[in-house]
Amino acid sequence: MELKKTHIYAYHAEHGNMVDFGGYAMPVWYEGIIPEHNAVRNSCGMFDTSHMGRVWAEGPDVAKFLDYVVTNDLSGLNEGNGVYSVMCLPTGGIVDDLILYKMGPERFFVVYNAGNREKDFAWLNKNTKGFKVKLTDVSNKVAMIAVQGPKAVEVLGKLSDINVSEVPRFNIASLKVSGIDCLAARTGYTGEDGFEVFVLDCTLEQPEKALKVWNDLVAAGAKPCGLGARDSTRLEAGLWLYGNDIDESINPVEAGLRWVVKMKKPGYFIGKRALQKIIEEGVKKTLVGVMMEERGIPRHGYEILDGENPIGLVTSGGVSPTLDVGIAMGYVPPEYKELGREVNIRIRKSLVRGKVVKHRPFYDETKYGWKRDK
Amino acid sequence: MADEYKIEAGLYYTNEHEWAKPGDGAVLVGIDDYAQSQLHEIVYVELPQVGAEVNQGEAIGAVESVKAVSDTYSPVSGKVVEVNEGLVDSPEKINSDPYGEGWIAKIEPSNLEANIAKLMDAEKYKQYLATLKH
C-alpha cells in the first residue's frame, strides 16, 4: 500500500529519515533526535503535524452538540478560546483526546489525532442526530505546523502580521504568516511555549503555501524536527499518547484526566453515566510517572513491579534527553501512586529500580517548559 | 547500498550485524557500522556480565537509541573476560568508531573454529548487506 503524504512531504523526502507512521510517510528525524529535541527545549523546533485530523463544526446547535460529545465544558468559551478535552464511549472509554477552538457563535475548529482521523470523524457524525450541525473534514485542505520552544514567539513573530506574543495560551488567532492566511493557536505537544499554525486553503495537491510557510520558518530559525523528537518532548512533558497511554479500554479518571471531565456541566454528555459510577466506586489502576534511579531505559510494554511482584505495565517510556535518565508512564493500582514510592521495572533480564514521580511534566518547571523562569 | 557502510576486513559478521575479531586467545566483539547507523544516536549500552558463559547467538546485552532497542547477540561461544566500561559514559563511541573504541566485550572462545564457520567474512557480509532493504 502506498503511504499517505502530508503537505510538507517534498521537504521531508529531501531532508528527512522517513518511516511509515500509521500509514503516513513521515520523518523520524532530519539531523538526529537529540539535537532536534534540544532545539525544542532550548530554542525553537518545528514539526509537520499535518497528518492530524482537522474539522470545522458549524451550525446553530454546534456548541450543544460538542458539549454532548466531549467531556469538558465548552459553555464558557469566548471566540478565540480553545480547550483540551476527551470524548468518551458510553462505557467511559476514551475515543480520543482533542482540542476544540471556538471560532464564532456557531463555528468551532476541532483538532484530533492522526491515527484516529477516520474513526473520530465517523464517531462525531454518528452522534449528530437531533443537532443542527455540519461537520467538514479539512485535514487535506489545511496544513498544520507546530512551532515550539522558548524562541517560538520570536521565530513566528518574524513572519507574522500580528504580535503573536499577545495570543494567550490555548487561544487561537487569524493572521498572515509570510503573507499567507493562517490560524495560530498557542498550543503544542512538547510542554514548551509555542504555536500550532494552520495554513488555510492549502490542498495536498497544491501544497505550495504550506511549503512556503515551512521554508520561511526554517530560514527564520525554526529547526525541523521529526517524530522522534515529537515523542521524546511529549514524554518529558508527561503528555498522553493515544494508543499508548489512553485508548477505548481506559477511562479519563484512570488516565489522570479527571480535570477534563466536567460532571456538573449542564445537560448529558456521552459517557457521563459510566463516569459517574467510576468516580463513585473508584478506579483499580491509575496513571503514574516513574523515573529510574538506576541505569536503564524503560519502554512501552515493560513490567512495573513492587519488589518482584508485577503491578502494572509501562505505557510510554524512554530516555529523557533533558534529564539524561530513563522515564516512564504506566498504570498501577492506586495504592502505589504516592510520589517517591519505590518500584522496579523489568528491563530484559534485570529488575531496575525507579520511583514514582510527578509526570506532568517530568522536568523542573522553573527550568524548562512554558512556565519556566524567564 | 552496501557501499554506504564500512566493513572491516579480517572480522567475522553475523546476520544480526555483530562482528567478531579473533586475537590472542580472546575474541573482541561489537556491533558493526550498519547496526550503529540504523540505530543512529546511541544513548545506552547494556554490557554483558564479566565471567558469564555465553553461547553463540545468545543475547548478551543491548544497544539503545532514543527510539529503539537492539539486542546484542554473541557471535561466538565462550566466557566473557572483559567488557568495555567506557561505553557506560560514552555509548556514542559505538557510532563514531564501531570497530575500534566502540567494542563491547572480549570473549575467551570455547569453540572458535565451529563458530567462525557459521559467520560471514567481509566479502560475504558485503553481499549479505546488499540483499537487505534500507
Image (cartoon, coloured by chain):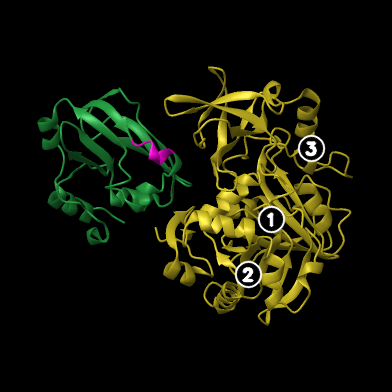
Q: Nearer the viewer, mark 1 or mark 3?
A: 1
Say few, some or many: other residues with alpha carbon within 10 Å of mark 2 (under 14 / 14 to 19 / 20 or more).
many
Tell which circle, 3 or 2, labels the residue nearer the N-terminal end.
2
In magenta, the rendered stretch is B84-88
Residue B90: horizontal and vertical position, in percent?
43, 44
Question: Which type of secondary structure does the marked residue at label 3 adopt?
Answer: helix
C-alpha separation, residue under disc 3 versus residue under disc 2: 33 Å
- The relative height of residue A298 versus residue A341 in the rendered view (above or below) is below
Write down the quadrant of residue A307 in the picture.
Answer: top right
Give the residue at mark 2: A142
Q: Amino acid at mark 2?
A: Val
Task: Report whether B134 appears left or right of A141.
Answer: left
Q: Amino acid at mark 3?
A: Lys
Q: Nearer the viewer, mark 3 or mark 2?
A: 2
Q: Is residue A82 magenta?
A: no
Residue B47 vs residue A175, the one in the foreground:
B47
Which chain is home to disc 3? Answer: A
* Count of marks, rendered view: 3
- The relative height of residue A347 versus residue A318 in the rendered view (above or below) is above
Q: In the rendered image of this protein, which colour is used for chain A?
A: yellow
Give the residue at mark 1: A192
Give the residue at mark 3: A272
Task: Report whether A119 appears left or right of A273.
Answer: left
Residue at the image point whose x is 10% and y is 36% from the top? B117
Q: In the rendered image of this protein, which colour is used for chain B?
A: green
Write down the quadrant of residue A163 in the picture.
Answer: bottom right
Q: Is residue A254 visible?
A: yes
